[in-house]
Image (spheres, rainbow, N blue to C red):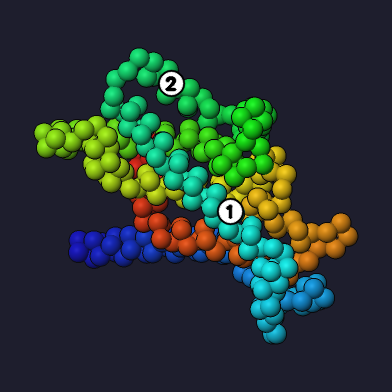
Amino acid sequence: MNDNLNDDKLNYKARSFGKGLLLNAFLLLITATCLFPLIWAFGTSLKTQSSVFSDMSIIPKVLHWENYYLAWTDGNFGTYFVNSLVYTVFTVFGIVIVSSLAGYAFSRLEFPGKNFFFYMFLAAMMIPLPGSFVPLYVVMQKLHLLNTRHGYILCMINVGLSLSIFLFKIFFDKLPKDLEDAARIDGCSKLGIWWNVALPLARPALAVIIIFNSLNVWNEFILANIIFDDTKFMPLQVGLSTFRGEFVTQYPLLMAGIVITVIPILLIYIFLQKHIVKGLTAGAMAG
């Protein structure tokens, strides 16, 4: 009897070990496929133009760090980087404020047309981004906001609102109302409850919204070309195209520029990783 139990335990441990080994091997494979393009781009950024196709090593023996300096100065990457940083910070800030207020209103307040307006925001999520470019351009033209920084920021805020409002409403729906009642007894207004109670408790949703919208703004290319005519307003992704000529592409400088564009978003993700995982898990459970 005891021998059978021991055999069952050993078989169970062996099966668990085998499943864990296969799962970890699969995850390592996925991780490698995600990291390899970044490692390859970093290695290529340290090569010369002539050795890009002749030197097949991932990391070259002679490291040409000057490619980053040339990309930053000769490619005017410094200006593009600052532009993208400004657009990302102000856009994400605007999205967080507007969408958190709207999400809290849809979750906690009662007003005429509440469900209609919320479903309209949900319907807007089904419209692909390029489908909104024409009306956005027409509106910006009528408001004389074309080729302006604040016009572009307003467009990007509009792009990110629907999903952000939806995520905030999901989290605010799950918050216990007892906390709000206690804050109301202490004299908090509705805005005070939103700022002091609801928003701090929605940090997982806040992290997801920040990283998703940061990625959208940081990687935007088409809308920037539509809104801007002056190159001094262009964001980072448009700046990458300066390394691609009609006949020659400067691959080391292009890869150096790509590495520069990846670093800020990577740092944001590392900093908010714990909250992002919580936010995605809670959002999936709520859905």
- Binning the other alpha carbons within 10 Å of mark 1 as few (below 14), some (14 to 19) or many (20 upward) gives many
Position in image of residue 58 (x %, y %): 67, 75
Q: Which residue lies at the image location 38% right of the left edge and 46% below the top edge?
A: 206
Q: Which residue lies at the image location 78% right of the left edge and 66% below the top edge?
A: 250
Which residue is tagged 2? Answer: 117
Element at badge 1?
A: helix
Which residue is tagged 1? Answer: 84
Query: Up-down: is 205 above or below 27?
Result: above
The residue most toward the front is 144
The residue most toward the top is 112
In primary-sequence order, the first of circles 1 and 2 is 1
Element at badge 2?
A: helix
Q: Which residue lies at the image location 27% right of the left edge and 34% below the top edge?
A: 191
Q: What residue type is labelled 1?
A: Ser
Position in image of residue 26 (x %, y %): 51, 60
Q: In this rendering, does residue 58 appear at all?
A: no
Q: In this rendering, does residue 138 appear at all?
A: yes
Q: Which amino acid does label 2 sit on?
A: Phe
Query: Up-down: is 211 above or below 75?
Result: above
Position in image of residue 61 (x %, y %): 69, 85
The residue most toward the bottom is 61
